Amino acid sequence: MDSDFIRGVEAGLEGRFREIDDVSFRNASRVLEAFRRNRVSDGHFAGTTGYGYNDTGRDTLDRVYADVFGAEDALVRVQFVNGTHAIACALRAAAPGGRVLSLVGGPYDTLRNAAEFDIVETRDGLPDFDSIEAALKSRRYDAVFIQKSRGYTSRPALSADDVGSLIELSRRVSPRSVTVVDNCYGEFVETKEPPMVGADLTAGSLIKNPGGGLAVTGGYVCGKRELVERAADALTVPGIGRECGSSMGQNRLLYQGLFIAPHVVAQAVKTACFCAGALERLGYATAPGSLDKRGDIIQTVELGSPEKLLRFVRGIQAGSPVDSFATPEPWDMPGYDDQVVMAAGAFVQGASIELSCDAPMRPPYRAYLQGGLTYEAGKLGVLSALREMGEL
Ligand SMILES: *Cc1c(COP(=O)(O)O)cnc(C)c1O
């Protein structure tokens, strides 16, 4: 019964999986080309301590990232404590002390205090181009902000082309506003990255997609050279900028993680599709649908009741390689109105390129699932959740 069900789900996904493999192949070849062009060599893996002057491994990795993302320059640092920190430095570079217009709903929760945001809400979950144009005409914004991923909203993720259309509009109406993209969860899901569709600055976390599951901490910013320099000043100190910041033995993992990231992201996207396909068969509402195009690695499922939601999340935890014996409990997370329950059985604390799941305890009892270092592990996690729900 289990194996018939699984075969049925996967048969329905064959075409999608081929497309995902194709995206992964094209991204992998772009990454390999960047390694070759920058002559990556094992001397780059040694790294530095202390101030980190002349860390050629670190500086070469910056150029590799720039090439992979189609940007003039990049700053890849373990000194970024998380994605929020990298994005906040990008915002400080783009709009020092100024106002920022967030084009597609509000920024991610942890970024709310990172700048003075004005917000254009979405209309039926989609970018509201008319309201964006009106807002851009109403005053001068130093920067505009675009979050590619859906984050913890109910709107769909933006595609790279959606991001491009928003940047085009901003350029036309407000040419002096710097365009900043929060690319968390978006990297390598498509073959185009935000700098390739015109973003001035793009930022994200290394314990999500581009770290390939190997990076243990850090973040990146990439884009126009002068803006990347300013982001480095925001990270350290004006005048020191990118010259300081030792890599502390992490270089090899950052290179190797980037090298496998296109494949690992494909595994996470397949896991998301499998989750959607399985739950659709069982009659649950999913977003995106199992066959929909994707702009990020997040899958949501409406479980409909607090009991089912808890069972789903607990099943994901039980199907994880680390802390499989732990029982997730809802808790009052700072900054949230409702209790939140989370499953995270990861090798790297909080790494959500590894299979993980979070959910606010409120109707429609929607679970947000993402990650999966291997499709096999992701599938096992989803099956564990279905078993815990009594569906298998
Ligand atoms: C994860 C994430 C961030 C940053 O989160 P950190 O936990 O600080 O790495 C920002 N925006 C989005 C859309 C995210 O998914």
Image (spheres, rainbow, N blue to C red):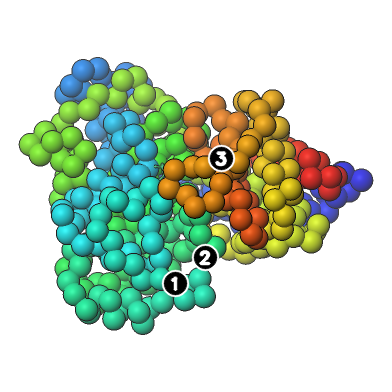
Q: Quadrant of the N terminus?
A: top right
Camera sees residue 361: yes
Give residue 360's position: percent from left, percent from top: 57, 50
Q: Position of residue 354 (x, y in %)?
A: 56, 37
Find the distance from the CA under tag 1 to the CA under tag 3: 29 Å
Please report the residue visible at 43 percent of the width from the left and 28 percent of the height from the top: 216
Find residue 198 and report its image quarter: bottom left
Residue type at mark 1: give it.
Answer: Thr
Q: Position of residue 37 (x, y in %)?
A: 32, 40
Quarter containing the C terminus: top right
- Point 28% across, 76% down: residue: 135
Residue closest to the eye, 335 or 237: 335
Q: Residue at x 28, y 50 (%)?
A: 114
The disc placed on residue 250 is none
- Residue 331's disc is 3
> Disc 2 on helix, strand or loop?
loop
Give the residue number, with chain letter if any, for mark 1: 122
Extreme right residue here?
1
Q: Is residue 149 left or right of residue 21?
A: left
Secondary structure at badge 3 equals: loop
Q: Which amino acid is tagged 2?
A: Arg
Q: Is residue 268 visible?
A: no
Relative to 246, is 206 above or below? below
Residue occupying the point 30% across, 79% down: 133
The earlier-in-sequence mark between 1 and 3 is 1
